[in-house]
Amino acid sequence: MLPFLRWWPSVNGSTTRDDAMAGLTGALIVLPQGVAFATIAGMPPEYGLYAAMMPAIIAALFGSSWHLVSGPTTAISIAVFASVSPFAHPGTPEFISLVLTLTFMTGVFQLILGLARMGVLVNFISHTVVIGFTAGAAMLIAGSQIKNFFGVSIPRGTPFFEILSLFVQHLQDINPYVTAVSVITLASGILVKRFMPKFPYMIAAMLVGSFAALFLNARYGVEATHIKTVGALPSGLPPLSSPDFSFGALNQMLFPSLIITMLALTEAVSISRAVATKSGQHIDGNQEFVGQGLSNVIGSFFSSYASSGSFNRSGVNYAAGARTPLAAVFASVFLLIILLLVAPLAAYLPDAAMAGILFLVAWSLIDFHHISLLPKISRQETIVLWVTLIGTLVDLEKGIFFGIALSLVFYLYRTSRPALEPVLPDPDPASYHYTPLDGRSECPQIKMMRVNGSIFFGAVAHLQQQLQEIEESEPERKHLVVMASGINFVDLAGAEFLAEAARQRRKMGGTLSFYRMKNSLAETLKRGHFMEDVGEENLFPAKTRPAEILYPKLDNEICRNCTVRAFPICHQHLPNGEPRSS
């Protein structure tokens, strides 16, 4: 309940000094990011900075990661805008009220999942889905800023593909002055990031873009350039706020809050685990759920919109030498001080410069390496990627769910088709392993198969079909030995299938046997009384030779005329004990 008590005793003068320096670096980083992310979310610019204050403190105190820094993120910001803009015009009091309601409900759901120990849920969101969603969100960010980047008129909230169509129609209306500021900002950000990686490239790009706008306005006049600015930010503490708890607002934000809950938790847990691989710290996913939930619930009353773990700030926090979560607290305090000092200067920040920065952010979000790698690895994963990406562009809320659903469908399809591989004993007489045929002939009466995969309701139909095909094509092989070490579990349908297969083999005059069946699987069959059909005498433990045990049950005359002699015992005598004549 109070996880900060675990690390608080380790705080001393040395750690506090390191945490303070890391916090100052983080505060400088989040200043342009917060304004940019709030713009993406359709909120007034200052709300992006508010979201980096109180939520960061609460998440640091109640989460499990010592380096995760919470605050506004790109994906959450675009999800907030897409979720709330259909119900209210961005930037209006009604819009802000609904966003606060969305933030509160998101926090409640996160808190419930954390207290219910449901941290395992994020494991069902594959890395491919996250890559596709992030790339789609990046393209949405770039699309939403086309009007500010080129100075063309495109209504706010226009769907992505319609934005592209309108932009093509308004090519002749591109404002050269606005575009010049955007390009200068973008280019300066790229150059600083490339040649001065330790310097905050966003701040550098913002300053260069602002000076470029000042120069153009002074040279040609605002009436000619039409370069708009963000406007001065209000300085001071984040004002107290109250979400809209009316039934209508709660009903409208219910489904979007579920989307953002899973998205935010996926971001937070994956980022904290990524940093933990470098720091060596153990991460408790459920505790992260609790920390994120509390940060959003409390943040909704301090003018904060939905927040999550920030990859940029967390990475910078770790790289800057943060020793404890106190660094995130220092970052919030320093951010407040900076806001009090520089808030009026935002009046000189051009919208075009912000658009240039967001173009750079969007480009950096697209994981080109893995996107190009996936087609070489898996066709199914490639399909999941593009379905998620395109679905996100069409409808951000449903895009990620389409990707999750499709990845689970492909997973279930793969697991519902366990591989059945014919095998024979290893030629090495001292070995107890079974290897693929590799051109060797099988015994005319014993069929040996390796099953790789669990036997559950989804796999039963596939296995029934496979066994039926074996029975029809090889009726003389009445004895079936299953190499069962690859079977991890069976459910009710699977147990009934095994019992029925055993009965069917007995009707044929043969047996169904298992080599190296796991004890847990055998116990399941016993508890359900399915072992009565399978027969414990047909379970062969490790380092036994099933063929030698089954050999006396084989047809003596078939063995007399057999030239295959697949097993060593075949060369010694016939099933009835009669010595081989040759």
Image (cartoon, helix red, strand yellow):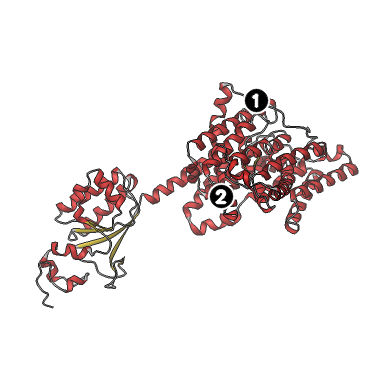
Q: Is residue 399 visible?
A: no
Q: CA distance from mark 1 to mark 2?
A: 33 Å
Q: Secondary structure at mark 2?
A: helix
Please state the total of marks drawn on the protein image: 2
Q: Is residue 485 visible?
A: yes
In contact (CB < 8 Å): disc 1 and disc 2: no
Mark 2, residue position: 273
Q: Secondary structure at mark 1?
A: loop
- Residue drawn 62% across and 45% down? 9
Q: Nearer the viewer, residue 198 or 284?
A: 284
Q: Earlier in the sequence, mark 1 or mark 2?
A: 1
Q: Picture coordinates of residue 269 (x, y %)? A: 56, 45
Q: Quadrant of the N terminus?
A: top right
- Left or right: residue 580 versus residue 355 is left
- Left or right: residue 293 versus residue 413 is right
The numbered dot on residue 274 is none
Q: Amino acid at mark 2?
A: Arg
Instruction: Return the residue found at the far bottom.
Output: 582
Q: Nearer the viewer, residue 435 or 465?
A: 435
Mark 1, residue position: 242
Instruction: Give the crowd class for mark 1: few <14, some 14-19, many >=20 residues within 10 Å.
Output: few
- Left or right: residue 195 versus residue 64 is right
Q: Amino acid at mark 1?
A: Ser
Instruction: Give the crowd class for mark 2: few <14, some 14-19, many >=20 residues within 10 Å.
Output: many
> Which quarter of the picture shows residue 215?
top right
